[in-house]
Image (cartoon, rainbow, N blue to C red):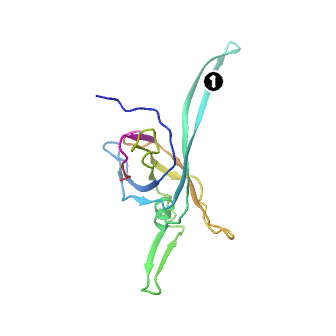
Amino acid sequence: MPTLTRVTKLYSVVDAKIAALTADPSTGSPTYATVIDVPGIQTMEISGDVETKQLRGDNTKLDSNSTVSNIQVKVDHARLSLDVLVAILGGTVTDSGTTPAQKTVWDLTAATATLPPFKLEGVTPAGGTDLIGGDLHWTLHKLNLSAFPDLGFAQEDYRIVSFTADASPLISNGKWISATLNETAAAIV
C-alpha cells in the first residue's frame, strides 16, 4: 500500500468552522453541536508554550525535561457572526420583527457569559498543499477563549473580527490538536 507524503507546503486558508463541545466523557468519544462557519476566515495562527525543567547537581546540568504546557490559536475573520459569538463566548441571539423591521440581537449578560468549550477546524484550499487536489485540515479539539474577542468598528475601514483561544486535551482521548493531510480535498463536516 503506498504511503502518503508526510511533508507539504501550506498555502492559504479557505474555510474554518467551529462547533460547541457538548460532551467529553472519560469513556467513549467527544460529541459536538452542529458546525458553524467562521465567515471570511483570513488567518488561523497556532502557537504553543513549552515548559522546561532542569535537574542540576554537582555544580552542573544533569538532565532536562520539557512538556507542552499550552497550545493557542489566533483567528482573524472578515465578517461578524452572532452565532460564532454565542459558540465561543456565550450569550443569546434573539430574532424578532417582520420585514421591513426585522432585528437580530446578540446579548451577553452575566448569566450567559459562559465561555463554552468548542472545536475549531480550518482547511487549506484544494492544491494548498504539495498534493495536487489535496488539502490539510488543522483541528483543535477543545478550546476556550483566552481573551475577549476583538470587536467594534474602524474609522473609514473594515473592522476585522478576531479571537484567541487556548487548547486543552480532551478527557475522552487526550487529543489537543490534529493535522490531517488529505490526498483528495475534503470539506469540513
Estimate the x, y position of residue 136 in percent, counting from the top left: 43, 43
**Figure check: 154 above or below 18:** below
Q: Quadrant of residue 70?
A: top right
Instruction: Name which residue type carries label 1.
Output: Gln
On screen, residue 112 versus residue 51, left or right, reads left
Q: Residue furthest right?
A: 59
Estimate the x, y position of residue 104 in percent, counting from the top left: 47, 76
| Front position in the image: 59 or 174 | 174
On screen, residue 83 versus residue 160, left or right, reads left
For the point 42% across and 48% down, the residue is 126
Q: What residue range appears in magenta?
A: 173-185
Q: Is residue 128 magenta?
A: no
Q: Which residue is mark 1?
A: 54
Q: Secondary structure at mark 1?
A: strand
Q: Residues within 10 Å of mark 1 (few under 14, many from 20)?
A: few
| Front position in the image: 187 or 25 | 187
For the point 37% across and 48% down, the residue is 24
> Exactly how many numbered labels are in the figure?
1
Q: Is residue 178 magenta?
A: yes
On screen, residue 115 versus residue 49, left or right, reads left
